[in-house]
Image (cartoon, rainbow, N blue to C red):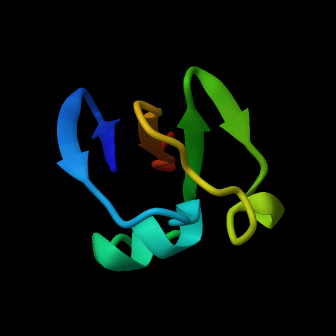
Amino acid sequence: MKIKIHGEEREIAPDTSILALLKELSIEEKTMAAAVNMEVVKKEEWDRYILSEDDKVEFLHFVGGG
């Protein structure tokens, strides 16, 4: 099935969760947020939030500074 990650089309397996997608992309999830179709998904829901065809996914990294 096709989704968009940061605007780029990507093919993923059906029934892929946000957490599974992060692992597939080798992205560290410690200091990050995820949004699907412009809606933030709580981190505790990532393992059971199943992506759908044509979803638009964004991963946002938080960087400390001062």
Q: Left or right: 32 with respect to 26? A: right
x, y percent for residue 54? 40, 31
Residue at 46 percent across and 42 percent down: it is 60
Name the foreground residue: 10 vs 40: 10
Number of marks in picture: 0
Task: Please say if 26 is above or below 7.
Answer: below
Decide if residue 54 is on the left or right side of residue 64.
Answer: left
- Could you say where residue 34 lies in the image, as x and y percent from the top left? 57, 45
Q: Is residue 2 above or below residue 19?
A: above
Left or right side of 3 for 8: left
Task: Tell which of 33 and 12 is nearer to you.
Answer: 12
Residue 30: tell me if it is visible: no
Residue found farthest to the top: 38
Q: Quadrant of residue 49?
A: bottom right
Which residue: 33% across, 76% down? Answer: 24
Is residue 21 something that shows in the picture?
yes
When the figure is inspected, residue 8 is found, relative to residue 47, above or below; the finding is: above
Relative image position of residue 65 (x, y in whole percent): 47, 45
21 vs 40, left or right, is: left
**Residue shown at 35%/70% (left/top)?**
27
Residue at image position (58%, 65%) is 17
Residue 2: x, y in percent?
Answer: 30, 43
